[in-house]
Amino acid sequence: MKIKVINKSHHPLPQYETAQSAGLDLKAFLPDGPVTLRPMQRGMVRTGLFIELPVGFEAQVRPRSGLALKKGVTVLNSPGTIDADYRGEICVILINLSDEDFVISDGERIAQMVIARHERAEWQEAVELSETERGAGGFGHTGTK
């Protein structure tokens, strides 16, 4: 699939890091210099990227596992959704869940983006739903073992 992209940053376009990667790494575009997220602070980080997705697709912005594990920094609204009709800059909402300051440098890989097909639902009102083994069992209904 080909996706139109405008890159206003000075970084290369996102790439898949391995042949079977699902996500493309997004890099911080910080032309004015590094940004510090203090513990429990959140902030929006620019990427300089603008995309045009085909109808029926979305881009999901997800955390990078290494950044979450090693630094306690994650994507706050994970996954963030970029709709096919959005034409603004892709930005990433990060939060620092650690107890130390986190400095974001220009060009740092801050998140990953997955392109995914989606369906649009059409509601069909009903008075009852079919029975299943699970039924209405919700959070933790299968136990911990």
Image (tube, grey):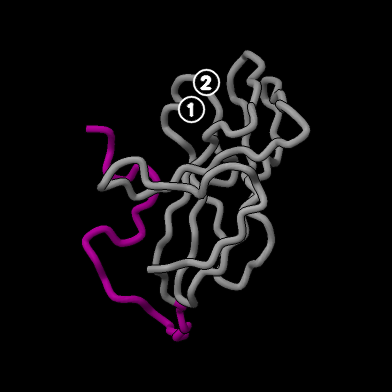
Position of residue 119 in the picture relative to residue 10 (left or right):
left
Query: Residue 79 versus residue 8: which sits nearer the camera?
Result: 8
| Residue situated furthest right in the rendering | 32
Position of residue 38 in the picture relative to residue 7 (left or right):
right
**Tag 1 near tag 2, CB within 8 Å:** yes
SS assignment at label 2: helix
Helix, strand or loop for the magenta stretch, by majority: loop
Report the disc number at residue 43: none
Q: Amino acid at mark 1?
A: Leu
Position of residue 17 in the picture relative to residue 19 (left or right):
right
The x and y percentages for residue 45 are: 67, 40
Disc 2: CA contacts within 10 A as few (<14), some (14-19) or many (>=20) = some
Q: CA distance from mark 1 to mark 2?
A: 5 Å
Q: Is residue 113 above or below residue 27?
A: below
Quadrant where the N terminus sits is bottom left
Report the disc number at residue 67: 1
Position of residue 51 in the picture relative to residue 15 (left or right):
right
Residues rendered magenta in the picture: 120-145
SS assignment at label 1: helix
Q: Is residue 48 above or below residue 69?
A: below
Dot 2 corresponds to which residue?
Answer: 71
Query: Residue 112 versus residue 27: which sits nearer the camera?
Result: 27
Quadrant where the C terminus sits is top left
Numbered marks: total: 2
- Residue shown at 48% from the left, 28% from the top: 68
As for residue 140 lying within the magenta part, the answer is yes
The x and y percentages for residue 107 are: 59, 34
The x and y percentages for residue 89 are: 67, 56
- Residue shown at 57% from the left, 63% from the top: 51
